[in-house]
Image (cartoon, rainbow, N blue to C red):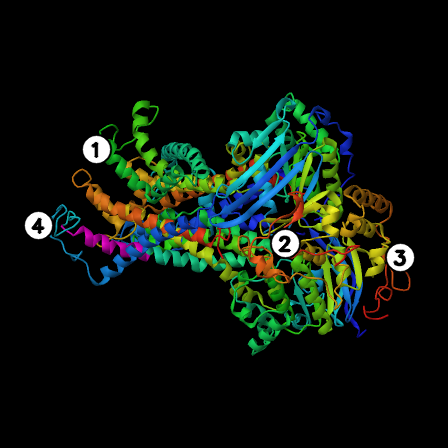
């Protein structure tokens, strides 16, 4: 009952938290990588060194040079241009699928926290069932019926990311619903919808942002895997995963065709993961000196 | 009946625990087992008990945040125990709450201005900012406080904000749930003084819930002692505190350390011995034998209280 | 305790029912007629309706669903629309291969993650912890199939130590089996190990913060012994959760790795079926994978009960 | 959720400690803290803390949140978080193996030296009984463990038997069965009794209790306090008792140190400090906590303002920004006035007591 604030507790950084400087470094590196990829994708909308649709038989499999910084592929296309345009696919798939997952998962999570406990459990069990359908599986099912495409990939990845959003948001929202400020809001006469919008949503906002960042990384991986299997971006749509697939047959001849898109994927995933980690620690109230 | 602010009759609240076995249904927890009392307008009514005694459940029911399993609760003469949420608007305007945790009761993502104005907005009032400043002034905070966030304040200041929010819709009844038990001792006195002054100035009815009998003694004129979902003793605070009649109240009084008594030699061993002595009595006495008394009659009455008996005059009466 | 097990079993059964309906509904209700898909765009109306009749596709959906589920329960998933072959034996063969691959990968992942994750948590402020942590971040960021390609490049192409692809059943040639298993298992295991390492790290970090660990040190245990004797069991709950989820990811990740290393597992069967537009095979394989995931979840739930006594009973 | 009823406090005094006090030399300092300072980054959390606890002595450490009392306790245990930098000296003298006195310089000792000291020479009871015990281990095993770690019993079987015995002594009903329970099956008061049993198992020379009853109900508090006092008395151990509750400290301790802003501002026998406080803070604290006392103009006595966040107390006298008597003189750290670290105060404008007390 009488839970007096413990004096020392307030000043002692709990063991195992990274220092503030560490968190800022993580945020900076993660944010930097993400920003760089975004800028590349945006620039590619108006300018790329070469037209990626153009097949140039005379310059096939060129190595790095002043003309082609990272060389060309088997069709003579400029690798730098391909990577730039490919980042668009990566970001688009990530944005749409994370958007789909958040738009469905966040309200679902809040709802599951605010309805009577039994209904919340049922909602969550249904949600857990979705976990049995990873992105790849959904995408394969969709592709089998519909044929491959970026949209198919986005929908599949989006649906499979719903459960993690719903889970994270629900557990956060349950915490918020137990707070006295929500009781105070009820006592003030606030309706459930107003409580959801004015109290629950803002207070789980940081969780949603962190989850979005992590889900984005997962979406990048899933898109790459799908394109690699030939189930994502169709031929002619530049995508990092597709570049990997096209380069694999030339693995012995030109391994750099695997290395460059591979590094791009890994960097993107690393960037979003670091951003997520950094944000999580940044929003963690246990971090020292938050005030 | 017009001078009765809150009337509680035979309120029972049962919870069912989740089942633990395949064959048996979950056991039932009796959080409240038939609680009855009246709070007169202008009265300062204390509810005292230890964790799990049902005082929080009782408070939620009075505030219309929970429904009793059976029994009746009237606030300002209106029955609230069967009303759906949307018809409790009058209650939200009349009765407001102050909570224990000065951090947890304020939304960290809202500015103080919005926190204090929340009851006003929820109840459809306009032009709130001047009212917010008025309220900040009333609880001893600067107008600049309106633009800041809760984490920028100390525990005592947060509790002042919480009180300001409760006073916003100009309620007639203030229900305070352990409002000072999370505060530092040096700040506790300030908040108690503030509550005291506000209740007096605005002629509020106060329901004050606490585990600490000495705090209740300072704030309230009447007290109900709760144990295991029942009121075991009820009466003027001075009588209950000085000569507790029910064994459980005796135990509470006996167990509470007091500075002056301790300096006079009431050590931990004495505390424990007195507590155990009172407990021994308590296990002999049937818990159904609730005790009620009023100013005229300080003898224990082994019968359940009737409302008339349990409504003593307000504090400032002779 | 018994009640909790019964509860979990009920959840498993309901989940199986619902997910089979989902898989069926997904394949059937989406626009696109399985018969037409199977025969391709050039098929005549007559061909299509003949196939529909042959496989009972004109029956009411509920009847189709029930006969499909009935078949599954009796371990008979039906006949392929395209090759007319029995699907059951194929799945059984392929499943064996995939399970071996997944088990090997999981072993590698766990063997990596438990010691390194714990070490990272204990040394989280020291250089060694930071270096390990950075390494694991990189590991997490590499897709498993890319790791596979890189491993092939190094160990098969450059060093010529191991075969680049292929599969030999263990009974046929154990030596060859192990050689061929190593690279695919490593590529899955390393990546999953990196992911798991991060979860172990955070679980151990959380446990290091617990009051009871401070109590353990106050009793006279050194930090390391306190962690081993009191911390690890408590850290196991979140780790087991992730392990369960990872097994599911691995099962599906194996689909891609089987393509990289040309392994005749469930994944290859699935991708071939997609290529051949053999929808009933797709439906069956997906269902097998979903069932595997659900069973893993069920086992994880039971493990919770074994680890945490608080879940077994309700507080007195 | 109704807590299981607390049962009778058994006389812990009736149980002979494994070594009788007569074996050891007469009252020695079991804990001796000198010039202890702790900083995090550049923020001072503790400054110039002097403190002594002798065998058989019960010393209280009182203060509000942020005063540094818990940090002081953790410093004595050698359990400060690793990024806090302590300076000064902390010396703990306990019985060591075989009853030969063992002295540990806590701030210099290595992890193994500290581990040998903790749970043997000095033991600790924490505030939160709900989280202090390992949820996945039976409580009997947790009590037995502290004896097997330090090999104060012959073997595991003996440890298990003695654990049941100890649980019985601290008043757990049906100790044999209670020993098989997991912590979540016990009430808060019962869990705290288990923690006390654990702390007393090896007859430590010093017991540190950090707000041990703050999370408990008042009737349970009375019994647990009694249990602690009897436990240390029977072992002739020293007690360092930390609390924010003046009445509790007065019921338990003989001597008291008042902390504020990371400093000891006043120290002395309980009766003297509480009836004739000299430091303005002590005086204010006593006034504010006495709910029976009213100002002439009505209302309780208060201290203005609020306790600053840790590390943000003013330089000089830490209390001066809340003190009505503060002058420019208080911008310098007031010197310690008194016979020694055990009795005195640090205030430039102390309360003057006339004949018969009051002011």
| Chain letter behind tag 2 | D
Circle 3 — which element? Answer: loop
* Rendered location of residue D64, percent (x, y): 63, 52
Left or right of A205? Residue B119 is right
Circle 2 — which element? Answer: loop
Camera-near label (3 vs 1) is 3
Residue at 71% in and 72% down: B172
Left or right of D138? Residue C126 is left
Quick check: C125 above or below A148?
above
Circle 4 — which element? Answer: helix
> Between marks 4 and 1, how big is the CA–CA gap?
28 Å
Examine the rendering and report whether any part of residue C75 can be seen. no
Whether marks 4 and 1 lie on the same chain: no
Q: Return the residue at label 3.
A: B303
Camera-near label (4 vs 3) is 3
Tag 2: Cα neighbours inside 10 Å, few (<14), some, or many (≥20)? many
Whether marks 4 and 2 lie on the same chain: no
Whether marks 3 and 1 lie on the same chain: no
Q: Any mark on residue C157, and which?
A: 1
Q: Which residues are magenta?
A: A76-92
Tag 4: Cα neighbours inside 10 Å, few (<14), some, or many (≥20)? few
Q: Mark 2 and mark 4 in contact (Cβ < 8 Å)?
A: no
Quick check: B294 above or below A264?
below
Tag 1: Cα neighbours inside 10 Å, few (<14), some, or many (≥20)? some
Q: Quadrant of the C terminus of chain D?
A: bottom right
Residue at 57% in and 53% down: D333
């Amino acid at each position: 009952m009488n839970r007096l604030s413990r004096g020392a507790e307030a000043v002692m950084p709990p063991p195992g938290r990274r220092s503030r400087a560490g968190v800022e470094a993580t945020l900076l590196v993660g944010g930097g990588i993400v920003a760089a990829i975004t800028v590349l994708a945006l620039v590619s909308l108006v300018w790329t060194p070469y037209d990626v649709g153009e097949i140039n038989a005379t310059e096939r499999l060129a190595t790095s040079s002043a003309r082609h910084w990272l060389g060309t592929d088997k069709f003579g296309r400029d690798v730098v241009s391909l990577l730039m345009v490919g980042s668009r696919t990566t970001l688009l798939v990530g944005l749409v699928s994370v958007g789909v997952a958040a738009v469905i998962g966040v309200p679902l999570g809040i709802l599951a926290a605010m309805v009577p406990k039994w209904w919340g459990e049922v909602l969550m069990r249904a949600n857990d069932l979705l976990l049995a359908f990873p992105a790849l599986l959904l995408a394969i099912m969709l592709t089998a019926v519909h044929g491959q495409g970026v949209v198919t990939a986005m929908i599949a990845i989006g649906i499979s990311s719903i459960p993690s959003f719903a889970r994270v948001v629900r557990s956060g929202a349950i915490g918020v619903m137990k707070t006295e400020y929500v009781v105070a809001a009820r006592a003030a006469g606030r309706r459930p919808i107003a409580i959801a919008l004015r109290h629950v949503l803002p207070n789980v906002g940081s969780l949603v942002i962190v989850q979005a960042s992590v889900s984005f990384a997962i979406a990048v991986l899933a898109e790459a895997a799908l394109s690699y299997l030939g189930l994502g971006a169709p031929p002619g749509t530049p995508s990092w995963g597709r570049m990997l697939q096209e380069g694999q047959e030339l693995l012995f001849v030109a391994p750099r065709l695997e290395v460059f898109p591979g590094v791009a994927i890994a960097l993107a995933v690393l960037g979003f993961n670091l951003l997520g980690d950094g944000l999580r620690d940044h929003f963690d109230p246990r971090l020292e000196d938050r005030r | 009946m017009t001078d009765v602010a809150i009337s509680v009759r035979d309120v029972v609240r049962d919870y069912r625990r989740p089942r633990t076995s395949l064959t048996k249904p979950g056991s039932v927890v009796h959080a409240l087992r038939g609680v009855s009392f009246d709070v007169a307008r202008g009265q300062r009514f204390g509810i005292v008990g230890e964790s799990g005694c049902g005082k929080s459940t009782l408070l939620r029911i009075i505030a219309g945040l929970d429904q009793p399993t059976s029994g009746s609760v009237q606030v300002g003469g209106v029955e609230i125990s069967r009303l759906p949420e949307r018809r409790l608007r009058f209650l939200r305007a009349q009765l407001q709450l102050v909570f224990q945790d000065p951090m947890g009761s304020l939304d960290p993502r809202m500015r103080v201005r919005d926190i204090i104005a929340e009851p006003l907005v929820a109840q459809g009032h306009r032009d709130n900012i001047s009212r917010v400043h008025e309220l900040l002034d009333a609880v001893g905070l600067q107008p600049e406080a309106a633009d800041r966030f809760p984490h920028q304040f100390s525990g005592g200041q947060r509790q002042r904000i919480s009180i300001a929010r409760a006073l916003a819709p100009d309620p007639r009844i203030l229900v305070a749930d352990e409002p000072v038990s999370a505060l530092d001792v040096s700040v506790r006195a300030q908040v108690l003084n503030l509550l005291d002054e506000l209740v007096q100035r605005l002629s509020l009815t106060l329901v004050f819930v606490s585990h600490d009998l000495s705090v209740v003694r300072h704030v309230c004129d009447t007290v109900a002692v709760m144990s295991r979902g029942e009121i075991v003793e009820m009466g003027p605070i001075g009588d209950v505190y000085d000569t507790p009649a029910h064994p459980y109240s005796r135990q509470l009084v006996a167990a509470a350390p007091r500075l002056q008594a301790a300096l006079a030699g009431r050590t931990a061993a004495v505390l424990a011995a007195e507590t155990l002595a009172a407990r021994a009595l308590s296990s002999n006495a049937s818990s159904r034998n609730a005790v009620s008394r009023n100013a005229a009659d300080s003898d224990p009455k082994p019968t359940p209280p009737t409302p008339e008996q349990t409504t003593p005059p307000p504090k400032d009466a002779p | 305790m018994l009640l909790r097990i019964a509860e979990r079993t009920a959840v498993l059964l309901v989940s199986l029912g619902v997910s089979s309906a989902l898989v069926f509904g997904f394949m059937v209700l989406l626009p696109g007629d399985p018969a037409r898909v199977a025969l391709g765009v050039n098929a005549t109306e007559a061909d299509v309706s003949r196939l529909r009749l042959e496989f009972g596709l004109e029956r009411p959906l509920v009847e189709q669903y029930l006969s499909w589920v009935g078949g599954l329960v009796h371990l008979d998933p039906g006949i392929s629309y395209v090759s007319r072959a029995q699907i059951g034996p194929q799945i059984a063969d392929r499943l064996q291969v995939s399970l071996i691959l997944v088990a090997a990968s999981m072993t590698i992942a766990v063997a990596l993650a438990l010691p390194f994750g714990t070490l990272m948590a204990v040394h989280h402020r020291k250089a060694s912890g930071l270096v390990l942590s950075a390494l694991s971040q990189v590991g997490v960021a590499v897709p498993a199939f890319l790791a596979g390609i890189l491993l092939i490049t190094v160990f098969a192409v450059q060093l010529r130590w191991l075969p680049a692809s292929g599969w030999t059943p263990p009974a046929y040639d154990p030596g060859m089996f192990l050689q061929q298993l190593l690279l695919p298992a490593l590529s899955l295991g390393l990546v999953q190990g990196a992911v798991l390492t991060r979860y172990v790290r955070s679980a151990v970090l959380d446990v290091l913060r617990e009051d009871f660990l401070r109590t353990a040190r106050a009793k006279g245990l050194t930090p390391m012994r306190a962690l081993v004797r009191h911390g690890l069991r408590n850290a196991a709950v979140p780790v087991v959760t992730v392990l369960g989820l990872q097994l599911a990811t691995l099962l599906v990740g194996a689909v891609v790795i089987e393509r990289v290393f040309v392994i005749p597992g469930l994944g290859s069967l699935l991708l071939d079926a997609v290529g051949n537009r053999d929808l009933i095979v797709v439906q069956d394989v997906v269902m097998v994978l979903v069932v595997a995931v659900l069973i893993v979840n069920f086992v994880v739930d039971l493990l919770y009960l074994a680890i945490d006594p608080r879940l077994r009973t309700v507080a007195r | 959720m109704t807590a299981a009823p607390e049962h009778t406090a058994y006389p812990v005094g009736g149980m002979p400690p494994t070594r009788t006090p007569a074996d050891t030399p007469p009252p020695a300092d079991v804990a001796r803290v000198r010039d202890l300072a702790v900083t995090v980054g550049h923020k001072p959390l503790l400054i110039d803390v002097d403190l002594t606890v002798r065998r058989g002595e019960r010393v209280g450490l009182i203060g509000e949140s942020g005063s540094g009392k818990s940090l002081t306790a953790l410093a004595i245990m050698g359990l400060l978080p690793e990024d806090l930098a302590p300076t000064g000296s902390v010396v703990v003298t306990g019985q060591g193996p075989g009853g030969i006195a063992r002295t540990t310089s806590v701030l210099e000792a290595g992890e193994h030296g500290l581990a040998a000291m903790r749970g043997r020479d000095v033991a600790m009871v924490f505030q939160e009984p709900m989280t202090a015990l390992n949820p996945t281990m039976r409580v009997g095993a947790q009590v037995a463990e502290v004896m097997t770690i330090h090999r104060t019993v012959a073997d595991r079987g003996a440890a298990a038997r003695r654990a049941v015995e100890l649980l019985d002594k601290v008043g757990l009903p049906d100790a044999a069965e209670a020993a098989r329970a997991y912590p979540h099956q016990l009430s808060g008061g019962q869990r705290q009794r288990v923690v006390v049993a654990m702390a007393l198992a090896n007859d430590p020379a010093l017991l540190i209790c950090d707000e041990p009853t703050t999370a408990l109900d008042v009737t349970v508090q009375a019994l647990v306090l009694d249990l602690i006092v009897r436990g240390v008395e029977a072992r002739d151990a020293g007690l360092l008792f930390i609390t924010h509750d003046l009445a509790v400290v007065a019921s338990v301790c003989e001597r008291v140190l008042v902390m504020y802003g990371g400093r000891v501002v006043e120290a002395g026998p309980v009766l003297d400090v509480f009836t004739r406080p000299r430091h303005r803070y002590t005086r204010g604290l006593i006034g504010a906590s006495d709910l029976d006392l009213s100002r002439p103009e009505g209302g309780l006595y208060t201290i203005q303002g609020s306790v600053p966040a840790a590390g943000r107390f003013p330089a000089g006298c830490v209390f001066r920004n809340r003190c009505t008597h503060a002058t420019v003189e208080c911008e310098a750290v007031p010197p310690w006035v008194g016979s020694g670290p055990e009795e005195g105060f640090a205030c430039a404008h102390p309360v003057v007591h006339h004949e018969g007390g009051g002011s």
